[in-house]
Every structure is written in C-alpha cells, then in structure tokens.
Image: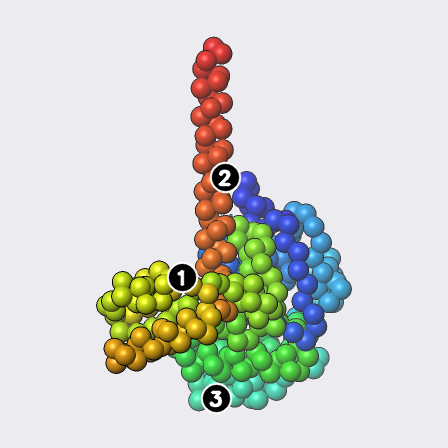
Amino acid sequence: MVRYGDVAAVDGLTFSVPRGSILALLGPNGAGKTTTVEALEGYRRPDGGTVRVLGLDPRRDRGSLTPRIGVMLQEGGVYTGIRPAEVLSLFASYYDDPADPDELVGRVGLHDRRRTTWRHLSGGEKQRLSLALALVGRPEVAFLDEPTAGVDPEGRQLIRSVVAALRDDGVTVLLTTHDLDEAERLADHVVIIDHGRILASGTPAELMQSGTSEEIRFGAPAGLDVRALTARLGAATEEVAPGEYRVGAAPTPATVAALTAWLAEHDLPLADLRAGRQRLEDVFLRLTAEQGSAATDDVEGRDRAGRRGARGRRARR
Ligand code: ATP
C-alpha cells in the first residue's frame, strides 16, 4: 500500500518476479505503475505491506541492494553537458565489476553519438543512453520504466533485443510500458493494474486465452454490405471502424469458411482475420473498461446513498 494523502496509489498489490525473467507491469495512466516501481527501488516508503528485492528490503538494505540493481528512470537525470562515453565511464567507476562502457555504447546503438553532449541527443537516443546507464553496473535486477517511450521503431527493436538478451544472461527485468504489443512479445509474465490494484496477471498467452471470445474480427475494404453479410452468416456483423469488422459468432471453421466464401464471391480482399484468441491489447482494454465502469457504478452508488442519506437527514430535521 502506498498513499498520497487520501489517494491509495497502490493498494493490496501482490506479485513476484522469478529470477531471470521479464515481468511487464501494465496499466492506464495513473494506475500506480511508477509508484510500485519506486517502492521496489526504495525511493518510496510503502504505507503498508512488504517489499523485497533479491530478498532484501529496498529501504533498510539500500546499501547492499543498490549495486545489484539497475534503474532506468522516465526522466534522464543526467548533466546536460556530458557525453555518452563520459557518463558511462563515470557511472562505471562507481561499480567493482562494471560493464565495458565502449561495448555498452555500441550495444545500445550510440557508437556514432558517443561524443555528442546529452542536450544534443534526440529523445530516443537519450532513452537508449538511460538504458545503458541502468545496465553499466551489470545488475541482477533491472527496473525499466517505459524504456521504449518516444523511441522510433528501429530504436524500439534495438531496446527490446537488449532487454531480451538481459533475460538470457539471467537478469530479472521489471518493465512498465504502454506498448501492449511489446509486452506481448517480450514479457514472460504480465501484471495488469488499475487504481493500484491487480486486474489480471499471468503469461501473455494465459491472459490472451482467458480473453477468448465468441467473435470473429476481420479487416476488409470499408463500407461492406454488413446486412447482406449478417444474413449470410446468420450472425450480427458490424463495421466497428472503417474497414474493421466484427462478427458476433463463435469462430467455427464453418462460419470462417462462409465469411471467406462471401468475400471471394464479391471479389473482396481479406486484410486480416482474427478468431478466438484476443490480442493482449483487447484483453487490457476490456479489463480496464470493466474496472472503469465498476468504479463509476461505485461512485454513483455512493452518490445515491449520499443523496438518500441527505434526504433522510432533512426529513428527520
Ligand atoms: P503513468 O502511466 O501516467 O506514468 P502510473 O501508472 O505510473 O501512471 P503513478 O505515477 O504511480 O501512475 O500514479 C498513481 C496515482 O498516484 C495517480 O493517481 C497519481 O496522480 C498519484 N500520484 C503519483 N505521484 C504522486 C505524488 N507525488 N503526490 C500525489 N499523488 C501522486
């Protein structure tokens, strides 16, 4: 539990990360991800509960834990006039057995920028340097807060391969991200939170399996005759976005065959087809929407109770 005044930013959150694996902590803005990560890093004192990293208390055992963890912050926190090669060498000097700064600068694709000052690096280059700084002490546990935010596709690919290689080297990684494809591809385990509480956790495959739905989604040219298709399939078909369709039927081979046959008869291309298992993004959106409406019901319920209470008090006066 972590409170900010009256707000319980993290409340009853329980999870563990097996060594040498990647856990992605997901949630909408304000869900409590950064607060959770800060409690694990020892920057924030929990108001209740137990936090352990490598079996140590992040605040009480800070001295022995700090050299064993690597932290990538959302904001760089680097002197703006320093260059990648310099700051990596400086950070390396704090550790007994650091990574080689030259190798690291190459690993994050900044070899050509190693003599450019921080202030002249692009946003994506700063992110990659921040990642390198988190790794310079050869951490056993790496905390990466939105490591690919604001990074171009090539840079994201590079960061993901660096993170995947960490796991192969036995490093435990906890990352936050708003890129659900990234979590789906990279993470061994996913925890979805909102309002400081866990909504779901499991492997990406488990979560996507749990979201198995009685619907078929497909992409085709915009403006199809959905009434004709509905009649043909015997199931409600709607265009949920231009060129994006949803059929409210179980994805049986017969229904999928009828759909593709109808498209073929009308000489229409099929851009993509999804049946059964949902993407992690679909699961995330469903869970957080349910949580949002539950919270609204709760507020409305309390509101109604409050109004009833006020009426009751007025009536008694
Ligand atoms: P984002 O995806 O936007 O980074 P997050 O999941 O990391 O969000 P947190 O930054 O942990 O969320 O915030 C959780 C809640 O706590 C939010 O309601 C936020 O407004 C609140 N909060 C965060 N930091 C503080 C603070 N220093 N003082 C008061 N409230 C805070």
Image-based side of 226 in relation to 1, left or right: left
Label whose residue precedes the other's in the sequence (3 or 2): 3
The residue singled out by tag 1 in the image is 248
Q: Which mark is residue 111?
A: 3
**Amino acid beneath label 2:** Asp
**How would you rate the neighbour count of disc 2 (Cα within 10 Å): few for under 14, some for 14-19, many for 20 or more?**
few
**How would you rate the neighbour count of disc 3 (Cα within 10 Å): few for under 14, some for 14-19, many for 20 or more?**
some
Label whose residue precedes the other's in the sequence (3 or 1): 3
Q: Is residue 219 visible?
A: yes
**Distance from Cα at disc 1 to Cα at disc 2:** 30 Å
Label whose residue precedes the other's in the sequence (1 or 2): 1
- Give the label, 3 or 2, closer to the camera: 2
- Give the label, 1 or 2, closer to the camera: 1
Q: Residue 92: x percent and y percent?
A: 62, 80
**Distance from Cα at disc 3 to Cα at disc 2:** 54 Å
Q: Nearer the viewer, residue 60 or 295?
A: 295
Q: Residue 304: x percent and y percent?
A: 45, 30
Q: Are marks 3 and 1 in contact (CB under 8 Å)?
A: no
Q: Residue at x 49, y 69 (%)?
A: 276
Vertical placement of residue 296 versus 38, above or below:
above
The kind of secondary structure element at disc 3 is helix
Q: Nearer the viewer, residue 114 or 294?
A: 294
